[in-house]
Structures are given as structure tokens and as C-alpha cells.
């Protein structure tokens, strides 16, 4: 973990603050690429992932932005209410599960706070003179983080703002914008689950291959756990078989038997806990794998995913 100090906390929009993090001694931070996130140990003990939204060439600081969501499990409220300038935080090194690929054209689609990794991508694409457009959808202008910063940036002409409460003419006509799949064009979408589902469904309807549609969710998908059943997990290396109760995750149940699985988000978003599956059928509950990866049934996220079969054999 890296210890950083909150250099600056800025109200960027209604309910959204940004935080500039740097080492207290001013030393360089590990380099990162556009689309990266860090784990942050939030006041109160939770760990949360936040995308870096500053220019990826900077090494003197990381910048994250957080939407205060009282309906969440408490991480965002603690960040807003408890964290002040000058406080120290523990963070991980940056990791990137949402990297930019080389493309002739890039379309970035942001829903609300989902702008953070896409803002970093926009800065990178602008710096290399790439052909790109950022569509930034929010409820209203006052809930649009970084609006003035983007409007004053060298890539302002590449950005289109779309407000839910604005007139019909400025709303995002997604089916029209992505009507023609092009081999060299890649789509990136980040935002709440409903926004991502809208984009991915529309893209699929318009014939976009899934390899050209890249996504990153914020927060976990709602789960219906009412029908969950107990099942068994076998540890391939030792042959030990453990019962996973209906109301406990695989990772937590194994932990009680001394089998440690590294976890971070515990909600199927970050991919830290990915474990290979040798036998059995997974019940994938994560937002991390693509549909194709899930269909292969050879790995799963034991922090939240379960089994459809009576037994899963894990490669640990
Ligand atoms: S701990 Fe994040 S996906 Fe499992």
C-alpha cells in the first residue's frame, strides 16, 4: 500500500467531490495508464475502487472523484463527510482493467460519475491527436463534474454534454450516434448499471461486436439471493471439500477454513479474487467478466459468484 495525503478536496458538482492525492514528501507516485483505478482504504475501514481522472503523464499526484451516494454501503459518504485536506490515506498501486486499445476512432460514453476514467482517456487521446468523441450524460448541468474544466480544455470540441433535464435536441440519440459499426472504431462506456446496459444493448442491436465495446461498472449489480442454495467446494491441491452455506460467499466460507483468497471490492467489480475453476458450473454474479469469459466457465469471482452444480473444484 502507498500512504498519500489529501492535497486538495474540491466540490466539482452537486454531490461530487474530487480529491488530489500525493505523497507527503512530494516523491513520484507509480505511473499509470488511462482507464486505471486505485483501491482506497476509506475512513471507517472499507476499501473502494476509484478511477484516476487526471492526466496519465502526471506522477506527482492522483486525482479521483466521488459521488456521495447515501444508498451505497457507506464508502462514498465517509469520503465526503470524514475526509479533509491534509488527511492521510492508504491506497494501492494503480491497476488497469479498462485499457484503451489502439483504434482509428474512439467513442467514449459517460454516465454521471462514470466520466472519471473516460476523462483520463480523453486527455490521452487528445494528447496523441487521436480521433475521438466523448458523450457525457448527466441529470443536469449542476451535477456535471469537471464541466468547466472540460469546456476550457484543448479537447472541448470533442465533448458533447447531454442533460436529462435539457431540451430534446441536446439529448443523446445513441442509436443514431452508433448506428454504423466500423471495424476500426471502439466504444468505451462507464457509469451506473442502467446506463451501461442501455449502451451495450443498443450497441448489440446495431451490430457492434462485443470486442469493440469496452465497459466498466460503478458499484455492484443488484443481486437476487432469495433462491441461493448451499453447495460444496473442493480445493484441488489438498482434496479438501468444504460446504458453502446459502448465506455466505465462497471466499468468506473458505476463509473460515484457513483458505485465504485475496479480495478487494467484495462485490464482483475489481477482479482481485479471480480463481480458476476446474470442474462444476459457475453461477457468475460479477460485473467483471464479459459474457464470453463467463461462458467459458473456467474462472469465477468467489467474493460474490456461486455454483449452479452441487460441487465446484477450484484450482487452489
Ligand atoms: S474482490 Fe473484487 S471481484 Fe471479487
Image (spheres, rainbow, N blue to C red):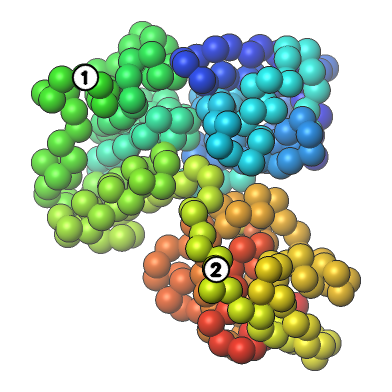
Q: Quick check: can you spot residue 188?
A: no
Task: Check the picture and name the quadrant holding the N terminus.
Answer: top right
Relative depth, front residue between 96 and 232 = 232
Seen in the picture, residue 134 relative to 107 is either above or below; the reply is above
Residue 103 found in image quarter: top left
Nearer the observer, disc 2 or disc 1?
Answer: 2
Badge 2 element: loop
Seen in the picture, residue 126 relative to 214 is either above or below; the reply is above
- What residue is at 70 percent from the left and 85 percent from the top? 232
Task: Check the picture and name the quadrant holding the C terminus.
Answer: bottom right
Question: Residue 135 placed where, x, y %?
Answer: 28, 30
Q: Report the residue that reaches farthest toward the front.
A: 226
Question: Whole-Å distance between the Cαs marked 2 and 1?
Answer: 40 Å
Q: Identify the mark at residue 166; answer none if there is no mark.
A: 1
Question: Residue 163 placed where, x, y %?
Answer: 27, 23
Question: Can you identify the residue that label 2 sits on?
Answer: 226
- What residue is at 20 percent from the left and 32 percent from the top? 172
Seen in the picture, residue 260 relative to 168 is either above or below; the reply is below
Amino acid at each position: 500500500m502507498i500512504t498519500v495525503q489529501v492535497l486538495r478536496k474540491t466540490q466539482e458538482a452537486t454531490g461530487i467531490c474530487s480529491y488530489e492525492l500525493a505523497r507527503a514528501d512530494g516523491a513520484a507516485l507509480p505511473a499509470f495508464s488511462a482507464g486505471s483505478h486505485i483501491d482506497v482504504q476509506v475512513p471507517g475501514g472499507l476499501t473502494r475502487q476509484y478511477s484516476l481522472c487526471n492526466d496519465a503523464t502526471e506522477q506527482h499526484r492522483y486525482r479521483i472523484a466521488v459521488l456521495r451516494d447515501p444508498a451505497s454501503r457507506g464508502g462514498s459518504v465517509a469520503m465526503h463527510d470524514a475526509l479533509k485536506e491534509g488527511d492521510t490515506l492508504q491506497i494501492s498501486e494503480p491497476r488497469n482493467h479498462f485499457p484503451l486499445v489502439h483504434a482509428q476512432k474512439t467513442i467514449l460514453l459517460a454516465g454521471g460519475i462514470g466520466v472519471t476514467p473516460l476523462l483520463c482517456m480523453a486527455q490521452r487521446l487528445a494528447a496523441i491527436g487521436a480521433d475521438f468523441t466523448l458523450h457525457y450524460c448527466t441529470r443536469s448541468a449542476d451535477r456535471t463534474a469537471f464541466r468547466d474544466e472540460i469546456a476550457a480544455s484543448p479537447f472541448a470540441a470533442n465533448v458533447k454534454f447531454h442533460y436529462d433535464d435539457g431540451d430534446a435536441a441536446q439529448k443523446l440519440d445513441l442509436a443514431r450516434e452508433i448506428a454504423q459499426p466500423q471495424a476500426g472504431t471502439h466504444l468505451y462506456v462507464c457509469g451506473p448499471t442502467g446506463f451501461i446496459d442501455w449502451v451495450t444493448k443498443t450497441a448489440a442491436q446495431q451490430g457492434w461486436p462485443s470486442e469493440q465495446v469496452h465497459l466498466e461498472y460503478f458499484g455492484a449489480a443488484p443481486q437476487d439471493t432469495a433462491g441461493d442454495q448451499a453447495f460444496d467446494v473442493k480445493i484441488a491441491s489438498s482434496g479438501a471439500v468444504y460446504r458453502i452455506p446459502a448465506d455466505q460467499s465462497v471466499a468468506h466460507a473458505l476463509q473460515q477454513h484457513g483458505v485465504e483468497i485475496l479480495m478487494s471490492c467484495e462485490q464482483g467489480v475489481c477482479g482481485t479474487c479471480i480463481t480458476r475453476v476446474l470442474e462444476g458450473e459457475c453461477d457468475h454474479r460479477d460485473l467483471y467478466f464479459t459474457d464470453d469469459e463467463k461462458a467459458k466457465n473456467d474462472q469465477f469471482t468467489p467474493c460474490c459468484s456461486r455454483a449452479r452444480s452441487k460441487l465446484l473444484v477450484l484450482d487452489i
